[in-house]
Image (cartoon, helix red, strand yellow):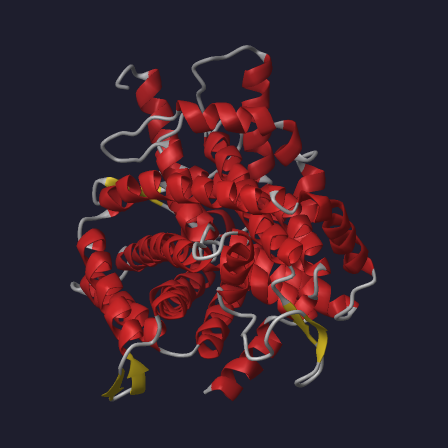
Amino acid sequence: MQAFVDFMNGIIWSPALIYLCLGAGLFYSILTRFVQVRHFFEMWRLLLSGKSSDKGISSFQALAVSLSGRVGTGNIAGVAAAIGFGGPGAVFWMWVVAFLGAATAYAESTLAQLYKEEQDGQYRGGPAYYIEKAMGQKWYAWVFAIATIMACGLLLPGVQANSIGNAVEATFGSGAMIQTGMGELSSAKVFTGAAVVMILGFIIFGGVRRIANFTQVVVPFMALSYIIIACLVVLLNIEQLPGIIGMILGDAFTPMAGFGAAIGWGVKRGVYSNEAGQGTGPHAAAAAEVDHPAQQGLVQAFSVYIDTLFVCSATAFMILITGAYNVYGVGDTFLVQNIAADIAANGPVFTQMAIETTMPGFGKPFIALALFFFSFTTILAYYYIAETNVAYLRRTIKMPGLIFALKVAIMTSTFYGAVKTADLAWGLGDVGVGLMAWLNIIGIVIIFFMAKPTMKVLKDYEDQQKAGVTDFTFDPKKLGIKNAHYWEKRHADKQAGKE
């Protein structure tokens, strides 16, 4: 199984996808005149001024749900893997992906808002919806929806749960070994997996509002706590900071692990972490209640900054400034070995050791707690994304019980991931992420050349800003945008005085 997964990853994560991710971000950055920089303060204003409704969640709640998908194990274990296999220079390429990816996030999230629908009393949208409506290719939309259900419902939850199980085991020990149908498992991982599944079931059976209410409290609190601890670790080793920054920048262009390794691991873990272009963020963006589609696109662009430039950087600086890492060469060789050779780079141990170095007795339990909340909220986001794509398929196929089957599947995947090895979990997750990224990025680029809807929406919003408008409106027909049925109806109702 591991050999097959590695083979699939070699095809999916070829240099072509790496260049596609960077290229799409650069493409939209240039065309929007670097919207991620020009509208930075507008992002802040929108983030704090949103509202919810009976059918939609607020901009902040949508940000929290999408951040719960972005801020996960990739921020802790993924950064460690990028450094371990790509060298310190991989961190620089994660920054590049974040900066360029913010423009990609704007484009895909604006499309999600623009082509969203009202289904079962709530807003639904995402790549499957805008691929069908903007590209007119329903078959392609179906391929994305099925790939996303497989990735978010079956593959990706295991990665998050795996990190939770590893962190608990590293903190409290493996406990007694239990013989099961899946082989010999540590009781610590079995009990952890069972606890996570029970809490997960309680929340996902409560619907999207319960998910939004949970994430809007937990995600900001844990992200802020994590960044504060990281700042303390850096401050206690502040004399080394200039050298660490120099090492990251120097190794980005003359990398110890090879130029391809630094870029490859930096981009792969960058995309895995911030999800820009991957197609997951747009699902939450579509659920937001906003006055103009561009508004949620800008808010979602800001979420990429939070994820990579803040949280991922916090992890990277902690690991590098304390020297709690190895850099792997070919086979079993090391280019840099600062810690024991048997410590895996694709887990949370690098980060735990980094905090332990400065705050003895605190690092392991804190990272275990942070990973639990980061990873658990990411699993919630994955469920919501998978549910949205099941809802998309149900527009055509009326099959009762699909949502229930999805809930059972994601709970099973979560438990399986919590008790199995990290390599297989990460490999399966990479397959899912890569497939979604290929399908979504190709889709948003084709849509641009077909009708340029994201550019029309952005110009309309900026024109209203220049005119000093405070009550923003949006009329897709006026801009020549077709199939934006929700916004057409909303504008007509507003004109008729019904809203």
Q: Residue furthest right?
A: 254
Q: Is residue 449 above or below residue 195?
A: above
> Measured from the top left, where is residue 362 in percent x and y?
43, 54
Q: Residue at x 40, y 65 (%)?
A: 167
> How many numbered marks are there?
0
Q: Residue at x 57, y 63 (%)?
A: 80
Question: Which picture quadrant has residue 268?
Answer: bottom right
Q: Residue at x 51, y 58 (%)?
A: 356
Determine whether, in the image, residue 364 is placed left or right of residue 124: right
Question: Which picture quadrant has residue 329?
Answer: bottom right
Q: Is residue 57 above or below residue 272?
A: above
Q: Nearer the viewer, residue 99 or 290?
A: 99
> Measured from the top left, where is residue 199 in percent x and y?
21, 57
Q: Nearer the viewer, residue 389 or 117?
A: 389
> Measured from the top left, where is residue 400 in percent x and y?
16, 63
The reply to whether residue 439 is visible in this rendering is: no
Question: Which picture quadrant has residue 1?
Answer: bottom left
> Measured from the top left, where is residue 158 in percent x and y?
37, 69
